[in-house]
Image (spheres, helix red, strand yellow):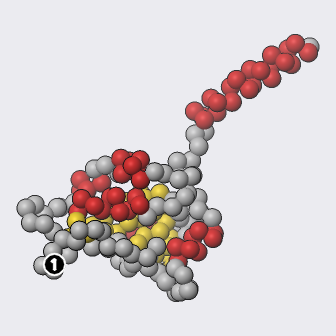
Amino acid sequence: MNRITTLGALAFVALLPACDLIDPPDWRIGEEPVSECTQRLAGWDSNLDVASGAQQVYVPTFTYDITKMDLESIQALIGEGDETAGSRTMASTNETSTAIADFKSLPVDDNGAFFLGNDPAMFRVRGGAQPFENIAQAGCERQQANMRLIEIDAAAMQTGSPVEAEPSETPQ
């Protein structure tokens, strides 16, 4: 009996790594390097109408999944010293997909807006004006631990201002 118990325990320990195949770890947990983020978001602009030719400046809106962030980190996103920063909303609807679509259609400012659902919870924020090719990198650089950039929207600025050399800094 002792030999069978030992073999059973060894088989159990040997099969533990296979548990990740059945129930893989959540991809939103931990830190994601900027290079992996930009690679994951390659082709994000395929559905946008990007002006060709002229150097144009765009204003991006970044949507992050913040479901796995702790309360202190989420509170830090709200902004230092301004408890009213951003729009905090919990859509009341019978369909999560409808509530999320409504949330994503709302305009946001550089203070951001929150969708506080169980899963997902999201944070949308407007980024600074910058050249189109810098947008994905800028959004990935804003990521924090347990936070993932999941969507980018960009709108061309209607001004004739020259393209900035560096992306604008916006508060996080």
Query: What residue is rendered at 35% in x and 77% in y?
Result: 107
Tell me if 73 is positioned left or right of 47 in this view.
Answer: right
Tell me if 103 is positioned left or right of 168 in this view.
Answer: right
| Residue 76 visible somewhere in the drawing | yes
Q: Residues within 10 Å of mark 1 (few under 14, many from 20)?
A: few
Residue 117 screen position, x and y as percent = 56, 66
Q: Nearer the viewer, residue 16 or 76?
A: 76
Decide: is 160 above or below 148: below
Query: What residue is rendered at 36% in x and 73% in y?
Result: 169
Residue at which label 1 appears: 161
Q: Nearer the viewer, residue 27 or 34?
A: 34
Tell me if 36 is positioned left or right of 31 in this view.
Answer: left
Q: Residue furthest front?
A: 165
Which image quadrant is residue 45 in?
bottom left
Query: What residue is rendered at 47% in x and 57% in y?
Result: 148
Residue 113 screen position, x and y as percent = 46, 75
Tell me if 24 is positioned left or right of 163 in this view.
Answer: right
Residue type, mark 1 in image = Ser
Q: Quadrant of the N terminus?
A: top right
Q: Nearer the viewer, residue 91 or 123?
A: 123
Query: What residue is rendered at 43% in x and 64% in y?
Result: 142
Decide: is 39 above or below 49: above
Decide: is 148 above or below 54: above
Q: Residue furthest left?
A: 53
Residue 7 screen position, x and y as percent = 80, 16
Residue 62 screen position, x and y as percent = 38, 66
Q: Nearer the viewer, residue 98 or 1?
A: 1
| Residue 99 visible somewhere in the drawing | no
